[in-house]
Every structure is written in C-alpha cells, then in structure tokens.
C-alpha cells in the first residue's frame, strides 16, 4: 500500500521484538517499565509519565479522552469496560534522533483497566507512542491513524499487535 511505502521510506523495517517480556512487566504491575521499554524499542529515548482514568465510566463518557479505544463488547455490540489511551505531545517536541529528545517528558493517560489485558496494553501503548515517532519526524502523515497503526508493525511489534488485536476480536465475538 502507499501508506506502507511512505513509512518504510521514513522508518525502515525492524525485526520482531519479543512481546512476552513486555507482557510480563504488565502482569508484574510494572506498566511504567513496560512503556519505557516500548518507547526504547521504537527508538524513542523519551521519559514517559503514565496517569490513569477511572476503571468504570458510563457508556459514551470518555473522561476527556480524544483517541480511539480498544474495547470489549457484549453480544449486542455495546461497549463494556473499554481501554482508552491518549498521548499528549507538546508542539515543542524535539526531532527524532536529536540529543534534546533524550529524556523529553511525554504524558500518556490510559484507562485504569489497562493492566487487566497485557496484550492489549502493549498494543495500545505502541500505537500511542507511534504518534510521538511520527510527530518527532515531522512526518506529513503524523495525524493519520492509519499511518500510526502501521508504525508499530513496521518497527517490530507485528506479533504484539497481532496478539493485542486478536485478544480484542476474541472478546468481541460474544
């Protein structure tokens, strides 16, 4: 596809990362370490601060989130206990590869239930941090969700994304 060609020209393609060690960090309730490791594997030497939104909120209430959610649905297709995340990226984000990106603070807000499903957590965080990758590259498609979805796949998170998306599909089936 055109989107893949555009990204490969900017990012290249990396070998798959080992997902199980990332999942184990979530299971051990060390999500900050997990997120830092995801960032490192994406080539981002940033410092990430996680904050959490309430575990339960009314349908349609995204508690200030503006990004999309991976959510479990019931047999009627109604969402229940979705995982939602949003990364806050300042306009002053340094360029990818520049020394000023090292330790640059980035805030990510995620729903409290994120720790319940390690595969989905890793997929969501790789997606959110891919927004940072594209913005730091000043990529012309930095606001495209399609391009952002492809970044972790190209940068070695293929198996993680496959497992995270499979988990969502299995829980949505009914």
Image (tube, rainbow, N blue to C red):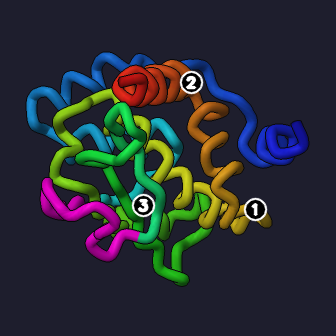
Q: Is residue 67 left or right of residue 171?
A: right
Instruction: Report if the CB atoms under discs 2 and 1 are less than 8 Å apart.
Output: no
The part of the chain drawn in magenta is 49-65
Residue at the far left: name it: 28
Residue 124 within the magenta-colored segment of the rendering: no
Residue 55 within the magenta-colored segment of the rendering: yes
Q: Residue at left 29%, top 69%?
A: 61
User: Local crowd at mark 1 within 10 Å, few (<14), some, or many (≥20)?
Assistant: some
Query: Which of the 4 quarters of the picture holds residue 15?
Result: top right
**Residue 9 appears in the figure:** yes
Q: Secondary structure at mark 1?
A: loop
Q: Secondary structure at mark 3?
A: loop
Residue placed under numbered mark 3 in the picture: 102
Label of residue 141 in the image:
1
Q: Residue at left 23%, top 47%?
A: 81
Q: How much space separates mark 2 and mark 1, taking CA atoms?
A: 20 Å
Q: Residue at left 77%, top 45%?
A: 7
Query: Which of the 4 quarters of the picture holds residue 23?
Result: top left
Q: Give residue 161's position: percent from left, percent from top.
A: 50, 29
Predominant SS of the magenta segment = loop
Q: Give residue 63's position: percent from left, percent from top.
A: 26, 72
Q: Give residue 144's position: percent from left, percent from top.
A: 69, 60
Query: Which of the 4 quarters of the picture holds residue 121?
Result: top left
Instruction: Report if the CB atoms under discs 1 and 3 are less than 8 Å apart.
Output: no
- Chain-order first, disc 2 or disc 1: 1
Q: How much space separates mark 1 and mark 3, taking CA atoms?
A: 23 Å
């Amino acid at each position: 596809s055109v989107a893949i060609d555009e990204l490969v020209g900017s990012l290249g393609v990396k070998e798959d990362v080992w997902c199980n060690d990332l999942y184990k960090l979530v299971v051990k309730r060390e999500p900050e370490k997990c997120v830092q490791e995801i960032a490192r594997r994406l080539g981002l030497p940033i410092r990430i601060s996680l904050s959490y939104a309430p575990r339960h909120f009314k349908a349609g209430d995204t508690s200030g989130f503006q990004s999309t959610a991976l959510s479990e649905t019931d047999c009627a297709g109604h969402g229940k206990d979705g995982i939602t995340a949003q990364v806050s990226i300042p306009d002053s984000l340094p360029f990818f590869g520049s020394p000023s990106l090292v330790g640059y603070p980035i805030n990510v807000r995620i729903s409290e239930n994120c720790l319940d499903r390690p595969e989905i957590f890793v997929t969501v965080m790789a997606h959110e941090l891919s927004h940072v990758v594209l913005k730091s590259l000043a990529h012309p498609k930095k606001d495209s969700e399609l391009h952002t979805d492809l970044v972790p796949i190209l940068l070695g998170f293929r198996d993680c994304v496959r497992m995270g998306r499979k988990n969502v599909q299995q829980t949505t089936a009914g």
